[in-house]
Image (tube, helix red, strand yellow):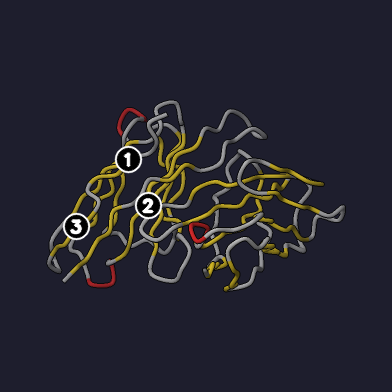
Amino acid sequence: LAKTTQPISMDSYEGQEVNITCSHNNIATNDYITWYQQFPSQGPRFIIQGYKTKVTNEVASLFIPADRKSSTLSLPRVSLSDTAVYYCLVAPRGGSYIPTFGRGTSLIVHP
Amino acid sequence: DTGVSQDPRHKITKRGQNVTFRCDPISEHNRLYWYRQTLGQGPEFLTYFQNEAQLEKSRLLSDRFSAERPKGSFSTLEIQRTEQGDSAMYLCASSLDRDRDRGSPLHFGNGTRLTVT
């Protein structure tokens, strides 16, 4: 499985756009990039998944450059409720792989 | 979609006691995973089921841990002779694996927090 590297922590302020970048230099051809969000005392929650270029949903956007060696989760106009840990996972979709989580990025949004 | 539910939410036990947790996955999901999470760390894989078959178990998992998924529906995770180091949040997740390239993302429950005193 491709190893991922993301910042341990980030700080932002309400109303700002937050971009969290994940590096995955050895991503494989059939790997997808998936992001999860986790609030304290809750299980992780799926946010977004992509393979290439750009994916957008009601929560976030995911930007993936042509070489796919990194990806950026973009949260527009964050609020205090976006304070959470964000995990980047890279793996095939389906099949026998085991989703493996790193330590994630702890985002703190300040008033 | 009623989501993944776990019971109990909290469990306090004394060292040496046995504990059992239950997970009810999303009904049409054929895969079920157990993870463990300690403070400041990401979820750590324990084991997973495809329907009723337990397909993989972490090599780090002690023999005191056992999981079942009878009839491919709910699952139980039992820890025997608990130790203080077992204190953690135990998370269950489910997903739908239709075929090799069409698996769904994980859907997690809110976990069972175990405290061993």
Which residue occupies the foreground of this view, B61 or A34? A34
Q: Vertical placement of B18 versus B54: above or below?
A: below
Q: What residue is at 44 percent from the left and 61 percent from the top?
A: B59
Identify the disc placed on residue B31: none
Helix, strand or loop at mark 2? strand
| Amino acid at pointer 2 | Leu
Tell me where residue A73 sits by quadrant. bottom right
Q: Chain of mark 1?
A: B
Image height of A84 relative to B54, above or below: below
- Disc 3 designates what residue? B11
Q: Which residue is mark 2?
A: B91
Q: Mark 3 and mark 1 in contact (Cβ < 8 Å)? A: no
Q: Where is residue A36 shown, x and y percent of the image? A: 55, 52
Pointer 1 or 3: first along the chain: 1
Name the residue nearer the viewer: B16 or A51.
Answer: A51
The chain letter for the residue carrying disc 3 is B
Q: Relative to B83, is B27 above or below?
A: above
- Tag 1 residue: B5
The image shows residue A63 at horizontal and vertical percentages of 76, 52
Q: CA distance from mark 1 to mark 3?
A: 15 Å
- Amino acid carrying label 1: it is Ser
Sequence order check, earlier mark of 3 and 2: 3
**Mark 2 crowdedness (10 Å alpha carbons): few <14, some 14-19, many ≥20:** many
Q: Quadrant of residue B28?
A: top left
The total number of labels drawn is 3
Amino acid on which disc 3 is placed: Lys
B34 lies left or right of A1:
left
Please state if B100 lies on the left or on the right of B28 as rendered.
right
Question: Image quadrant for the N terminus of chain A?
Answer: bottom right
Q: Give the mark nearest the N terminus, 2 or 1.
A: 1
Query: Looking at the image, is B36 positioned above or below residue B116?
Result: above
Residue B53 picture location, percent across and down: 41, 36
